[in-house]
Amino acid sequence: MKQKNKIKSILIANRGEIAIRIAKTAKIMGVTAVGIRTLKEPNALYLSAVDKVVDFPDIDNGGIPEFLDIESLVLLAKRNNIDAIHPGYGYLSENAQFATRCTEEGIIFIGPSPRVIQNMGDKVIAKEIAAKNNVPMLGGSNGSVDTLEDALDVAEKIGFPLIIKASAGGGGRGMRVVYKKSEMKRMYFSASSEAQNAFNNPSVFIERFLENPKHIEFQIVGDSHGNVIHLGERECSVQRKHQKLLEEAPSPALSEELREKMATAAVSLAKGAGYVSLGTVEFLLDKQGNFFFMEMNTRVQVEHPVTEMITGLDLIELQIRIANGEKLPITQSDVKLNGWAIECRINAEDVQSGFSPCTGIIKGLRTPEGEGIRVDKGVVTGSEITPYFDSMVAKLIVHAKDRPTVIENTLKALNDFHIKGIKTTIPFCKAVLHNEVFRGGSFDTSFIEKDMDSLVHHEKDEALFGALLAITNHRNENEPIKEEKQVLDMWSLRNRINNM
């Protein structure tokens, strides 16, 4: 479909791998990609992926983090005559005020309208829209619960367990599960206080708590011409403290009939909300096959590549074209789900220390290659992992003809994915993929706590590898050998051991 050139340039209000991802598509579309250089990452990899680099304004912004500074970002776009802003995910991607300021200044916000962002970001309003459009709901409070007395009244009606959630946010913050009446006072005020600190809004609501469900989300996309379609589902049940760690598409839990029911509900909600752009409708699925609306994310997701792999569509391109006022280039009948895809989030975290962030310099990096393998990364050898930003450094996405094959291919790719200098979640991803409950597809959101005997996978003959590695280090002790070459030699050594 021919680009109408309404959007000729895009300011990417983000960093890391998603900034690179957006820049890649923009370039293919003939749109100038503009990246933002910050003092915290003056030599970041994403700056080499854009067409133009602009420096974050040298002004007193009261200490607001760069990618959360609405006025400075708008100012950058205005100063440089940039047509549109793409917020990526996180940061200001679901901030209605940011979208409003862009609109006021004549800048195209690549995402939904401020009104839709506001409505779907407010969990109470989102639930009301879902109910009006016959989307299955968990029982709970009718709107926000503003006093402890009201909270106790709701608890009396719906029973325990129940969950208290922040009205204005997500990501597990401002969320408390309550199993008995004696916990209500403490949990209510704890959730409200955390909601205030995280979202500057203490409002909470209550709903029935579903024990150990599956977390299934549907990708929808709508244009400004009244067209809304879905692009299938993603399985997101492998998570810790409500944070996703590994995703796949499609879900092993869904029959064609159930998929159609959930997709119909997702599209109905999007249409009812007047949704224009890319979005995700998230559901909880119980063991009896009943599903319930949880929330809607009004942005591109971290896990969007698995949908791209099984549909062959570029979701960032769809976002840009819709923001440009174009009609969707496809209809629902054009969407075909092909094969299976898995995404592993490679985070700079020490899994054995409670997934604590790990900072440092990446001294060696080698990523897997081959058919069906995609790596979205924001680092290279020499990159510094600082405490200022999110711990995710890369995403490994693998596509194959079916689920058993993609599991095996992902494990092979992880064996070829090496990062030296920091600890990562690669051993955790391997442990998940080796786990028989995961392989069987019956896992749910309690998978990590219930079904994983170990959070890391130990390589075959690891002790032997350690001994040979020590010998190799001793041998090279007095040789003028470059560290990166030595690292690659050691990786080759490990592969030879594992293939014995």
Image (cartoon, grey):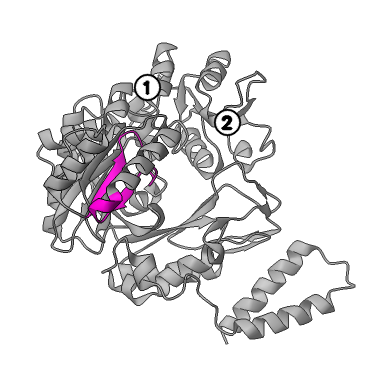
Left or right, 51 with respect to 269, comes to: right
The quadrant holding residue 387 is top right
Residue type at numbered disc 2: Pro
- Nearer the observer, 361 or 187: 187
Mark closer to the observer (2, 1): 2
Rendered location of residue 433, percent (x, y)? 41, 70
- Is residue 347 rendered magenta in the image? no
For label 2, the SS is loop
Q: Residue 4: which numbered mark, if any?
A: 1
Which residue is found at the position 68% from the left and 80% from the top?
Answer: 466
Residue picked out by circle 2:
65
Secondary structure category for the residue under label 1:
loop
Picture residue at 59% right of the left edge, 40% below the top: 46
Camera-nearest residue between 348 and 446: 446
Q: CA distance from mark 2 to mark 1?
A: 35 Å
Please name the residue shown 72% across and 83% down the image. 468
Q: Quadrant of residue 353?
A: bottom right
Q: Residues within 10 Å of mark 2 (few under 14, many from 20)?
A: few
Taking 373 as reference, is 392 above or below it? above
Residue 76 at least partly seen: yes
Q: Magenta residues, as a range?
A: 161-183
The earlier-in-sequence mark between 2 and 1 is: 1
Compared to 265, does 55 lie above or below?
Answer: above
Residue 424, image x, y percentages:
57, 61
